[in-house]
Image (cartoon, rainbow, N blue to C red):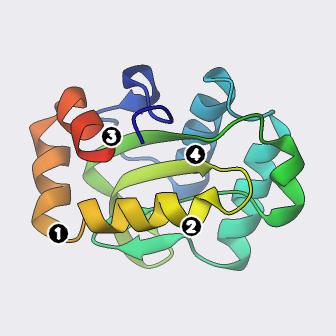
């Protein structure tokens, strides 16, 4: 996964904001990283409005609906941490990982994230530690 995540696509210790702002933040990071076109952010919002992208363990994984796949330029992820948490459709989220993935790569990425963030303590340690390199190391191979 090291080829799809870069240190500049990790933002730590962000003050709480609403769910839409969080999705727009990680979506903007994906745009600036050259992974997606701007329209993909609307697909991320649409996906989360139709089916929550909260995955458990204080993590949300916003990604675009299928019809926005044409706006993906390359596979990549962006990470934002919220030490104070944000409300995500009735759940508290402390880490938001925006995903842009070609073809079925999103399933592989989701699986890797789930494997590496299996325990709530793993997430809390990364969020509360505030160390970009630790987040990178956890998500990269």
What distance separates the C-alpha of mark 3 from that of mark 4? 26 Å
Q: In whole angstroms, how far apart are the C-alphas of marks 1 and 3?
A: 19 Å
Quarter of the figure with residue 115? bottom left
Residue, x 70% and y 71% (percent of image)? 49
Q: Are marks 4 and 2 in contact (CB under 8 Å)?
A: no
Q: Of the residues under marks 3 and 4, which one precedes in the sequence?
A: 4
Q: CA distance from mark 4 to mark 2?
A: 25 Å
Vertical order, 34 against 74 (above or below): above
**Lower position in the chain sequence, tag 1 or tag 2:** 2
In the rendering, which numbered label is found on residue 107?
2
Name the spot of residue 72 as percent of width and height, x first: 78, 41
Query: How far apart are labels 1 and 2 at the CA level?
Result: 21 Å
Q: Which mark is residue 120?
A: 1
Please tell me which residue is depicted at 14% across the width and 59% down the height of the picture: 122
Q: Nearer the viewer, mark 4 or mark 2?
A: 2
Q: Where is the C terminus found, in terms of image quarters?
A: top left
Instruction: State the mark number for residue 140.
Output: 3
Residue 62 x, y percent position in the rendering = 58, 58
Give the label on residue 21, or none: 4
């Amino acid at each position: 996964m090291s080829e799809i995540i870069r240190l500049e696509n990790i933002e730590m210790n962000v003050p709480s904001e609403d769910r839409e702002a969080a999705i727009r933040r990680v979506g903007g990071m994906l745009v600036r990283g050259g992974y997606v076109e701007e329209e993909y952010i609307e697909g991320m919002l649409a996906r989360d409005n139709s089916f929550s992208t909260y995955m458990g363990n204080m993590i949300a994984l916003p990604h675009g609906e299928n019809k926005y796949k044409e706006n993906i330029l390359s596979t990549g992820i962006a990470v934002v941490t919220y030490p104070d948490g944000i409300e995500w459709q009735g759940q508290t989220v402390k880490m938001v990982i925006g995903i842009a993935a070609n073809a079925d790569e999103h399933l592989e990425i989701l699986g890797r994230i789930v494997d590496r963030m299996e325990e709530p303590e793993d997430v809390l340690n990364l969020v509360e530690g505030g160390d970009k390199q630790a987040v990178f190391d956890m998500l990269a191979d």
